[in-house]
């Protein structure tokens, strides 16, 4: 059944109006008619089964016929601090991190991260949110990850200092995730730091470790940053979350 994202405030009435690209997709791409059913999700954990009542140019009205809270979200609140990298790679990470169940993705300013002006960054945030929304729709998530504001390493690490599981992935550190997490009991939050092209420098790592982050490696090969992000998230979700 096709699924579409709506803002939570749109779900306050029995009938919901869909417009813009969503109306176009339903009417002209899917070619659905009155009486057809689709699914809406509001990004807060709820999913709604709705029936199309009327279709007209640029606007579709649907009626809610069911509401549920599917158990599709990870029990692990997983926060990814990702050093800012070139456009398409950052977009890839946001897409895959959403699919892998992250709760938040925070772009980071690190010693080797890409520099970008504020005007361009504002446009990127719109693009990143759209990518995350589409990824959530595709994998049938019911919550949208938070896309955080660009943050420095010190500020980010201080924000999550109280979290029990905090890892910074560094190619110069040989201890793997299984060894680092050995003996770790079930936790409900974990924070990961992934570096840019060229990796974290020693000062970034020193800052993170001062806030209780543990350095971990991802094996003997040097991974591209987008590969490292997917590998690290998958390992943590397997060890502590809901990947099986």
Image (tube, rainbow, N blue to C red):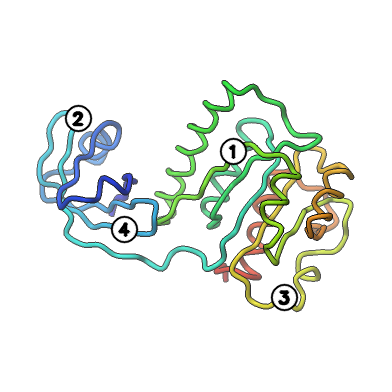
For the question of whether residue 65 can be seen, the reply is yes
Q: Where does residue 208 sit, x and y in percent of width and height? A: 80, 51
Query: What whole-number distance in Å separates the C-alpha atoms at marks 4 and 1?
Result: 27 Å
The circle on residue 58 is: 2
Q: Which residue is rendered at x = 57% and y = 50% of the image?
A: 97
Q: Is mark 4 on a helix, strand or loop?
A: strand
Give the structural element (helix, strand or loop) at label 1.
loop
Q: Position of residue 103 (x, y in %)?
A: 54, 55
Above or below, 123 relative to 8: above
Estimate the spatial distance between the alpha carbons at disc 3 and disc 1, rounded to whole Å: 30 Å
User: Which one is in front in this view, the residue at disc 2 or the one at disc 1?
Assistant: 1
Q: For marks 3 and 2, give the one nearer the viewer.
A: 3
Q: How crowded is mark 2: few (under 14 residues within 10 Å), some or many (20 or more)?
A: few
Q: What residue sits right under mark 1 in the picture?
A: 149
Location of the C terminus (image quadrant) = bottom right
Question: Viewer-nearest of labels 4 and 1?
Answer: 1
Residues at discs 4 and 2 in contact (Cβ within 8 Å):
no
| Front of the two marks 4 and 2 | 4
Dot label at residue 47: 4
What residue is shown with label 3?
184
């Amino acid at each position: 059944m096709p699924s579409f994202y709506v803002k939570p405030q749109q779900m306050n009435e029995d009938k919901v109006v869909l417009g813009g690209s969503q109306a176009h997709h339903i009417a002209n791409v899917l070619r659905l008619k009155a009486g057809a059913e689709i699914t809406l999700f509001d990004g807060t954990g709820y999913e709604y089964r709705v029936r199309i009542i009327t279709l007209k140019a640029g606007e579709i009205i649907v009626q809610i016929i069911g509401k549920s809270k599917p158990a599709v979200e990870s029990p692990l609140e997983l926060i990814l601090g990702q050093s800012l990298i070139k456009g398409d790679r950052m977009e890839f990470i946001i897409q895959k991190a959403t699919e892998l169940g992250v709760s938040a993705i925070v772009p980071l300013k690190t010693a080797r991260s890409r520099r970008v002006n504020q005007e361009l960054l504002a446009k990127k945030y719109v693009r990143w949110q759209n990518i995350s929304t589409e990824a959530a729709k595709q994998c049938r998530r019911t919550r949208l990850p938070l896309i955080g504001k660009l943050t420095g390493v010190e500020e980010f690490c201080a924000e999550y200092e109280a979290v029990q599981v905090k890892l910074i992935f560094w190619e110069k550190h040989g201890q793997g995730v299984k060894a680092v997490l050995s003996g770790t009991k079930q936790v409900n939050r974990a924070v990961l730091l992934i570096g840019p092209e060229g990796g974290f420098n020693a000062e970034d790592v020193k800052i993170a470790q001062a806030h209780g982050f543990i350095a971990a490696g991802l094996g003997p090969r040097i991974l591209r940053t987008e590969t490292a992000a997917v590998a690290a998230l998958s390992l943590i979700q397997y060890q502590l979350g809901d990947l099986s």
